[in-house]
Amino acid sequence: MTAARPPRSWRRAVLGVAVVGLLAGACTTTGNGTPEPLEPTVEQPVERPVAGPQPGGTLRIGLPSDPVSIDPRDVVDASGELLVDALFDPLVHIDADGQAEPAAASSWSIDEDGRRFTFTLREARFHDGSPVTAEDFVRTFTSIADGTAAQPSFLAYLLAPIEGFEQMQTRGGAFDGVEAINADTLRITLRTPDPGFLTVLSDPSLVPVPAIAAQDPDGFAEQPIGNGAFAMAGPRSPGAFVRLTAFTDHHAPPLLDEVVVTFYLDDVTGERQWQDLLDGQLQVASIGPEHRAEAEQRFGRSADGYRGPGLIDGITATTYLYGFDVTQPPFDDVRVRRALSLAIDREALADDVMRGTRVAADALLPPPIPGAQAGTCRDCRHDPRGARALWDEVRAELIAEAETAAAGTGGDGDASDVARGDNAGDGPGDPQTDSGAAGTDAGSADADTGTSDADGAGSNDASRDDATGDDDGDAAGEDVDGGAPGPSGAADDGPAPDAMLDSIVLTHTRGVTHTAIAESMAADIRAALDINVSFVARDLQRLIGAIREGDVGLFRFGWEANDPDPAGYLRPLFHSENVGADNLTNYAADEVDELLDAARTLDLSSQRLRAFRRAERRILDDLPAMPLLWYRHQVVVSDEVRDLVHDPLGRLGLADAWIDTGA
């Protein structure tokens, strides 16, 4: 038996913030739906003497939902990913520095052009004793990429860079870019150079499946046979608990004997999980904001925000944004976009509205992602006076242009006749030259959930957004309007030339959390700019459709990537090739495209990160989307659980955890 592996702080178990029962988007509300304030807390780092790793014991985890599927090829939610990650090993894992390390592959090489990856598999067996071969990886990749399947996988976007992907989507058959050279050698060929694709291969879904998965897919879905550190103790019974047992033939067997996962399907606030944690029935549980102070007092606080025991509240890899359709007036003017961003009090959103479960964002990349640069967004500060000055400047310019046009034609000066430029950077002090108007969510969506706003290395609109766990309260149905009336911009003789600046609409996905954020934003904008601000809630799919049809100018979306790489954020959201897919803002800028293309060809080096940093700064100069908030974990790990890491991507290191019987 091989010694257990050292802890990996990037190990994947779940998507985004909807993990381990984390109800990041849910919060207790008053009778009128307004979140109650959170009591202040005092940091108390957990410092206890520990004898050393001890084998044996059971870890009991609470989850808020029953997974839709635990077949790795069909995983669409956080609960499913947690189980799949425990049952299977992908080719590589991600270490504490965000670099790839061996998992199912013992070694690999990348050709000089960065297109061809060759993996040597370690000798290993599935839980049923059959050997793991390269063909088992080909089987999974082919199944996920097959767009002609009766139920195409939401995860296909992960494989989009591979040669032959487009053919797989339209015709199925053999996957040209994925080849089993022999039993223990796998070759993956990309369409274009991208050394960073190596980290994508750490996704819990890109794992080997045995032949039985194709022969008996229903049976396999009930009791998957994997190659990971844990095995299913028996078939899954939906709605009941799941028991995982240690797989002792794994190359790095876990210290735990078993993991028991309990689903709290009707526990919207997490109250039952909290009580079971206090009663000793759970050792890992999510908490609502109302229990944060007590949780810290009882269990202490994780020293780094990610490793238990104690309250785990580190910043995650999910960003909450509002995007602009930069092809629509008045949002085609960068000064308008800047003014709206400056009007918003992000600190109030994080501390008051979200009660400490979020952090004010001042960049596109969350802090845990390599290459992140705090404070990059110059317009993410709260500056109502600066916002009003920009707004008034645009208003005065519209009026002056209309008057000039009227004088030249002898007409009445209809503002609609005034030509508008790209003006991404035409305001004073703005060096940028093009805002990126372009023609015409993403594969995951977790939506947040990442279920499938399909798009490459990131999360897709429909799925990743769901994964953020914020769709938590409003019923489905007709769109819901909100907001208070503002000043009227219409005169009896027709609209004024600056009428487009008299009102805006914030459109967001349904949920108590999203509505509370929109209400706060509307109040800030109304106070700073003295305009009418309303907000509309829509179902996720209807919202995505409306955005792509050009019917929505200012909209909420969330994003998290599948691996710790800036490419997973910046390329799908802001490269012009993704307009019509994850680039919902229709943003296109040649300089940004060039920077992102250049960065993709570089290996995981400081040079690559510098290119991404330049791209992020350039994007934020144009501000096609305004970052508002980053998420925090809200999970409590009991005193006796050691080395359980809940990393920024939401991955839970079950294989490295152990129980301290002396705690």
Image (cartoon, rainbow, N blue to C red):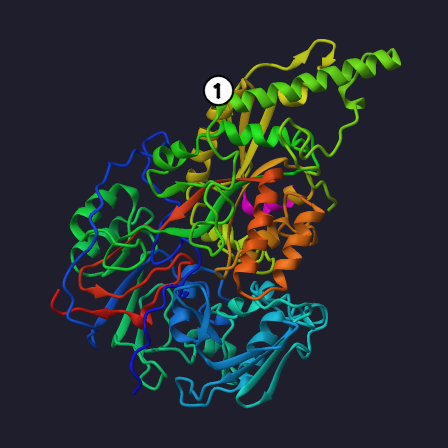
Answer with left or right where residue 390 lies relative to residue 344: right
Residue bounds of the magenta highlight: 539-546
Question: Label 1 amino acid?
Answer: Ala
Where residue 635 appears, as percent x and y from the top left, is 30, 53
Instruction: Judge by depth and name the residue closer to the eye, 60 or 8.
Output: 8
For residue 382, above or below residue 399 = below
Query: x%, y% of residue 612?
Result: 57, 53
Q: Position of residue 527 (x, y in %)?
A: 48, 20
397 is within the stretch colored magenta: no
| Residue 556 x %, y % | 54, 40
Residue drawn 67% across the image and 19% down it:
499
Q: In the rendered view, would you say 333 is above or below 232?
A: above
Say few, some or many: other residues with alpha carbon within 10 Å of mark 1 (under 14 / 14 to 19 / 20 or more). some
Tell me what residue is drawn at x 75 percent, y 31 percent.
421
**Where is mark 1, residue-wise?**
527
> Which of 651 and 493 lies nearest the eye of the viewer?
651
